[in-house]
Image: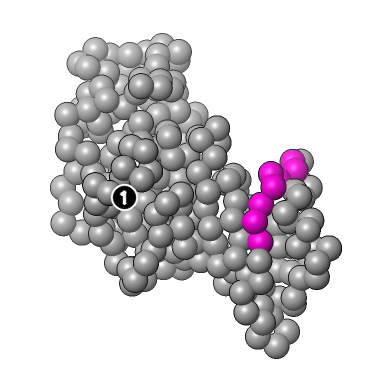
Amino acid sequence: MEQIRLQKYLAEVGIASRRKSEELIRDGFVKVNGITVTEMGHRVTGEEAIEVNGKIISGSQKKIYVMLNKPVGYISTAKDQFGRPSVVELIKGISERIYPVGRLDYDTSGLIILSNDGEFTYKMTHPKHEIKKVYNALIHGVPNQEELRAVKNGLRIEDYITSKAGIKILDIEGDKCWVEIAIHEGKNRQVRKMCDAIGHPVIKLKRIAIGSLTLGDLKEGNWRYLNKKELEALNI
């Protein structure tokens, strides 16, 4: 099993930001397998019994994996400084603490996974695993071949160049069109910034697939457990 730093794990499972997680560790509020850990270099897999302020957040819990069709207007973190509703609030009837696996923008809808498995979260979100994410976007205008080629080859956005991506036009609606965009990265608002970079801003954005997992007929705002076949296809 791959190991990551404890503070990174706490941040990934939605306990707190990386900096705040470091403070929790430094101040003695975190235990791993019953032992208080105060060193920043401590590494975990997520299989350990990890406690924060006396509450177990991993280890002995039953592993939970669910998919949600996120509506616009929900954040994909456990807490928000502005008091906006979280995707976690849409999951009813599960007593275990679960958290979003990766993020989906407040104003973007579609597929998001929630779990309490830290190793699963690491595998699904670490860039080296290159998990493909597919989006349908309604954008202003219709990209020409040169603009489509630019997306496919990589675009300069702020201080980085995107990896090669997939893009195809699905439908043209007057002065707007629907496109399908597939990326392996997950930088902040990346799809929107890519569309801005070619002069075709996003009007609506929905994620329809993560790796082999697709939304199917799951209605917006609804969720369900991932089945064994789906988990196996994700190599979990």
Residue 54 lies left or right of residue 39; in this view the side is: left
Residue range corresponding to the magenta coloring: 160-167
Q: Is residue 88 on the magenta stretch?
A: no
At x 30% / y 22%, what residue is drawn?
30
Residue 29 showing in the rendered view: no
* Location of residue 218 (image quadrant): bottom left
Rendered view: 193 above or below 142: above
Which color scheme is applied?
one colour
**Numbered disc total:** 1
Q: Quadrant of the C terminus?
A: top left
Residue 8 spot, x, y in % from top left: 45, 28
**Residue 152: x, y in percent?**
72, 54
Above or below, 65 relative to 197: above
Quarter of image, res 33 = top left
Residue 141 appears in the rendering: yes
Where does the image place residue 177, in percent across and percent down from the top left? Answer: 66, 78
Q: Is residue 219 left or right of residue 105?
A: left
Which residue is painted at 66% across and 52% down in the image? 165
Q: Say above or below: 55 vs 77.
A: above
User: Alpha-carbon neighbours of circle 1 within 10 Å: few (<14), some, or many (≥20)?
Assistant: some
Expressed as whole percent of the image width and height from the top left, the position of residue 194 reads 70, 57
Disc 1 is placed on an element classified as helix
Identify which residue is drawn at 20% across, 16% down. Answer: 34
* Residue matched to label 1: 230
Quarter that holds the N terminus: top left
Which residue is outermost to the bottom? 174
Residue at 61 percent across and 74 percent down: it is: 170
Observer-nearest of 167 and 223: 167
Q: Which is nearer the eye, 43 or 63?
A: 63
Identity of the amino acid at label 1?
Glu
